[in-house]
């Protein structure tokens, strides 16, 4: 069977460009064991994520937005930080460009995330890469990199990274939307004394601790956290972007220092 018959194609110079998926075989991805593994891994952290989604939905509902607007935002935006940043600006009547700029600044970290995940997503058609970008969240990025960060790039013959991402993203998106909608529609019955915001923060903290398995990662997280705290006063929540850039810089510097030490340059 030729590559064309198998639904695969190889672009450009055959020796230089990776195999690409001409079409996505969802059945093959669904049957892949990594899809189930991704769903199981994501399900373990979903209680905390859903608590955070519930908080986001409640905040949007109690901010004065119409229920249908809050519901549409919960389903379409799929980004708690962007939602929580945009809602006060919407209610204050801020210019549209300010709202867009604020949301873009808050989400600039995903440029770094997508750059690291590109090695596995580059084999997908453009439309599927756009969908993967929409479904990528902090937790899906962390889990995908943790499990397949050092694996060979995804390809028509190596679907494991894509199947794992698919399983985790489906659970994360479904759970998040369910939690956010529950918060929007049940805001009047959910007391703030439940401390759901704290539960969401604990879930993210548990994920961070699970990821920090070596000194470099731990040091990077500490420096990024300290930078975010020190720069919290920056407008448009730019402290998040600054903390990400500082953390990445520390990680890259640590890698360069480690390589120089191994080569005897230090």
Image (cartoon, rainbow, N blue to C red):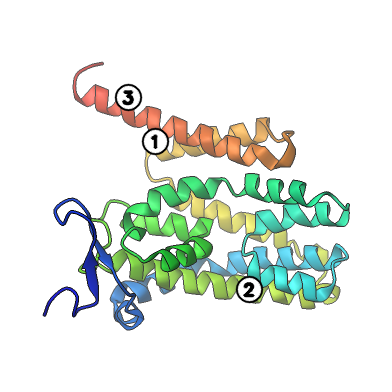
Judged left or right of residue 169, residue 94 is right
Inter-mark Cα distance, 2 to 3: 43 Å
Q: Which x, y percent locates residue 193?
A: 81, 63
Please tell me how crowded label 2 is: few (under 14), some (14-19), or many (20+) other residues with Cα within 10 Å: many
Residue closest to the far front: 12
For the residues bearing labels 2 and 3, Cβ distance under 8 angstroms: no
Front residue of 236 and 248: 236
Q: Residue shown at 36%/72% (left/top)? A: 37
Q: Which residue is mark 2?
A: 177
Earlier along the polypeptide chain: callout 2 or callout 3? 2
Inter-mark Cα distance, 3 to 1: 11 Å
Q: Quadrant of the N terminus?
A: bottom left
Query: How many marks can you see?
Result: 3
Front residue of 85 and 99: 99
Name the image quarter holding residue 47: bottom right
Q: Which residue is mark 1?
A: 216
Q: Residue shown at 24%/60% (left/top)? A: 11
Front residue of 50 and 192: 50
Q: Which label sits on residue 37?
A: none
* Residue 225 can be seen in this image: no
Task: Kindly state the secondary structure of the residue where label 2 is placed.
Answer: helix
- Compared with 114, 11 (above or below) is below
Q: Residue shown at 61%/55% (left/top)? A: 202
Earlier along the polypeptide chain: callout 1 or callout 2? 2
- Between disc 3 and disc 1, the foreground one is 3
Q: Which label sits on residue 257?
A: 3
Judged left or right of residue 69, residue 48 is left
For the residues bearing labels 1 and 2, Cβ distance under 8 angstroms: no
């Amino acid at each position: 069977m030729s590559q064309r018959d198998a639904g695969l194609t190889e672009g450009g110079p055959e020796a230089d460009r990776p195999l690409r998926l001409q079409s996505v075989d969802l059945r093959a991805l669904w049957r892949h064991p990594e899809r189930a593994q991704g769903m199981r891994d994501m399900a373990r952290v979903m209680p905390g994520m859903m608590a955070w989604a519930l908080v986001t939905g409640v905040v949007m509902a109690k901010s004065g937005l119409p229920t249908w607007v809050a519901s549409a935002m919960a389903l379409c935006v799929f980004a708690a930080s962007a939602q929580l940043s945009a809602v006060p600006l919407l209610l204050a009547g801020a210019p549209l460009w300010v709202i867009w700029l604020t949301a873009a600044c808050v989400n600039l970290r995903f440029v770094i995330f997508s750059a690291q995940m590109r090695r596995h997503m580059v084999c997908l058609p453009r439309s599927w890469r756009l969908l993967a970008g929409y479904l990528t969240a902090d937790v899906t990025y962390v889990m995908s990199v943790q499990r397949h960060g050092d694996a060979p790039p995804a390809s028509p013959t190596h679907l494991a990274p894509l199947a794992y991402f698919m399983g985790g993203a489906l659970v994360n998106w479904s759970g998040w939307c369910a939690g956010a909608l529950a918060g929007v529609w049940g805001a009047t019955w959910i007391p703030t004394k439940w401390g759901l915001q704290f539960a969401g923060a604990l879930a993210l903290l548990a994920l961070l601790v699970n990821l920090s398995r070596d000194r470099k990662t731990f040091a990077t997280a500490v420096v990024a956290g300290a930078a975010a705290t020190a720069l919290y006063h920056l407008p448009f929540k730019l402290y998040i972007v600054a903390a990400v850039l500082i953390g990445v810089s520390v990680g890259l510097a640590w890698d360069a220092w480690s390589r120089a030490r191994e080569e005897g340059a230090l």
